[in-house]
Amino acid sequence: MKTIDDCVRKNIASMQGYTPGEQPKIPDLVKLNTNENAYPPSDTVCEALRTFDWKTLNRYPDPTADAFRDEAAKRFGVKRENVIAGNGSDDLLTMIFRTFADETRKTAFLDPTYSLYEVLAKMQDSPVIKLELAEDFSFPSDAELEKLKDANLLIITRPNAPTGNAFPLAKMEDVLRNFDGITVFDEAYADFADDNCMELAGRYEKALVMRTFSKSYSLAGLRFGYAVGSAAVIDELMKLKDSYNVDKLAQAVALAAFRDEENMRKNAARIRSTREFLSGEFARRGFAVVPSQSNFLFVSPPDRNGKHYFEKLREQAVLVRYFPAERTAEFVRITIGDDRETARLLEATGNIYPEP
Ligand SMILES: *Cc1c(COP(=O)(O)O)cnc(C)c1O
């Protein structure tokens, strides 16, 4: 008789699932580990929820979220056919991997970067090409980029996670000119950055830009993301997405949040300002700080022991993220919090590494 193991696809049996950041129930926890927004969503979002016509929930949602697509198309100067909505950008990534990655179509991404890509590549049995970031986490060298000639799908996280830095736009365009496959810019943190790749998505047929409402729009709990690209690429993704991948409530709330861009910008500006203050504080205290364009900092404590700093913070109910891999072990990733959380973080840090 066949065992369950015999029935499971080999690549699935041998892979590790994605490990999400912890969501623990520690009293009075300062939660700076999963890059959620420090501030709640706007009153406009509250209003959209309050006035949502719950009686319509007996009917399926618009399968393609066209009201949102039209609004996004207007904002970015493209057409509806250039936009696709997803149940968070993780859903878009799943569509992208299903469409462009398999046993012969290899996937390339940065190292270190968002660890979900590797999980999705394994699901597709797609060989992975890792492009090592330079010593200071800047963009991979030209020699490293040579590896791209074997790739079919390239994902560039910009700003990158967990490092937080962005790569020069001119470099991004170089890549688009030279790389022959599909290039995806995962711009989960673009609203905290000085610039973004949206304009490139309009000019290069094989480029795709992904955004999420989980970070800058304070809606990680809702699940909504979208991608912008050529109609030819979007059409392929449409074929294999779940029919009703974005629920009716998420469509209504995301649309309301998107229309209230001003509130998002206001919160992003506050977060950027806290980020600059905190970067200075860490530098003053002898930490190495990667220049951040995102809503988090990647810092290495004076003893360069990321694990120690992570554990000692956790003992004081301050939760950050530690990545044990070789390249990241000297660092921790810290989400930018509100003023109270920032004060708690600095106080707890001072108890571990006394101020100079
Ligand atoms: C948070 C994050 C995502 C996931 O976004 P969701 O819309 O919440 O699924 C994707 N990519 C990167 C780089 C992220 O940091």
Image (cartoon, rainbow, N blue to C red):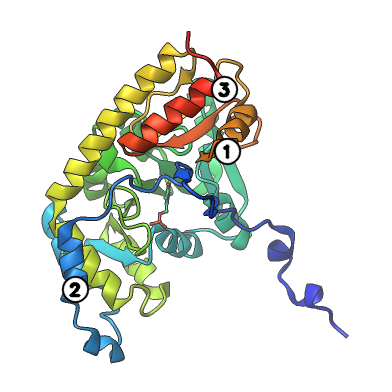
Q: CA distance from mark 2 to mark 3?
A: 45 Å
- Callout 3: 10 Å neighbours few (<14), some, many (20+)? some
- Callout 1: 10 Å neighbours few (<14), some, many (20+)? some
Dot 1 or dot 2, earlier in sequence: 2
Q: For the residue marked with disc 1, what is the amino acid?
A: Arg
Residue at horizontal 13%, vertical 58%? 259
Farthest right residue?
1
Q: Nearer the viewer, residue 222 or 139?
A: 222
Residue to which mark 1 is pinned:
314
Residue at horizontal 69%, vertical 57%? 15
For the residue labelled by badge 2, is the local secondary structure a helix, a strand or a loop?
helix
Q: For the residue marked with disc 3, what is the amino acid?
A: Ile
* Number of disc labels: 3
**Ligand 1 under 8 Å from disc 1 Cβ:** no
- Callout 2: 10 Å neighbours few (<14), some, many (20+)? few
Residue to which mark 3 is pinned:
352
Residue at horizontal 49%, vertical 35%? 333
Assess whether mark 3 and mark 2 are in contact (beta carbons under 8 angstroms): no
Vertical relation: 187 (above or below) 61:
above
Residue to which mark 2 is pinned:
50
Dot 2 or dot 3, earlier in sequence: 2
Q: For residue 251, which quarter of the picture?
A: bottom left
